[in-house]
Amino acid sequence: MQHINLETLANGAFSVQVNRAIQEVAENIQDPNTEASAARKITVTIGFKPNKDRNFVATSVQAKTALAPALGTVTALSMGKDIKTGNVEVVEVTTGQIPGQMSVSDVPGVVPEQKPYDPDTGEIFDQNEGSDGTPERNIIDMRKKA
C-alpha cells in the first residue's frame, strides 16, 4: 500500500493551511489584548467522498483555528442633556475631569501659582532668600501643622 505524504497532500495546500493556522495561534498567544492562559485549538479536517464504484475519492482538507477572544475594556461615559439645545450628549471621560466641570486654568485671568518642587518627591521648596541674595530651597514639611 502506498502512503500519502501530508506535506504534499492537495499539492501542498494542506501543509500551507496547517502552517497558517499555527501562525494565527502564535500571534493570538502573543497578543496582549487576549487572555494569556486561554486554550487555543487547531482542528484539521480531512473529508473523503468516494464515488459509487469506490475507485475515486474526492478529498477535502481544512484547518480551522479557535482563538482566544480579545479582552474587554472599561471606560467611563458622562451623559446628559445640553440645557440650551435639549440634545442628549454622551462624552467619554478621559482626563479624570467631568465634562462641563471647570478647572482653575479655565477661569479667565486666573493663573495658578507655580511653586518650585522636587520632581522626585513632589515636595515644595520654600522660597526664602539666603544671606547672599540667592533663593534658598528648603523643603517644606507638609506633616507639620501651620
Image (tube, rainbow, N blue to C red):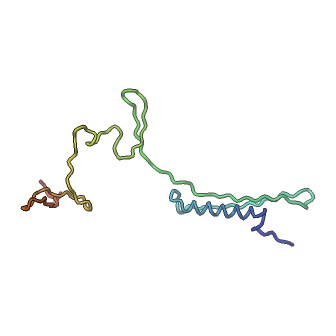
Q: Quadrant of residue 83?
A: top left
Answer with left or right where residue 13 lies relative to residue 127.
right
Q: Residue furthest left?
A: 131
| Residue in the picture at 90% in, 60% down | 54
Residue placed most toward the observer, 8 or 21: 8
| Residue in the picture at 78% in, 69% down | 5
* Residue 55 placement (x, y as % from top left): 91, 61
Answer with left or right where residue 109 lies relative to residue 75.
left
* Residue 138 placement (x, y as % from top left): 14, 61
Q: Residue furthest right?
A: 53
Residue placed most toward the observer, 30 or 38: 30
* Residue 71 placement (x, y as % from top left): 51, 54
| Quadrant the N terminus occupies | bottom right
Q: Quadrant of residue 23?
A: bottom right
Answer with left or right where residue 123 lies relative to residue 42.
left
Q: How many marks?
A: 0
| Residue in the picture at 40% in, 31% down | 81
Q: Residue furthest bottom?
A: 1
* Residue 88 placement (x, y as % from top left): 43, 32
Q: Quadrant of residue 8?
A: bottom right
| Residue in the picture at 52% in, 62% down | 36
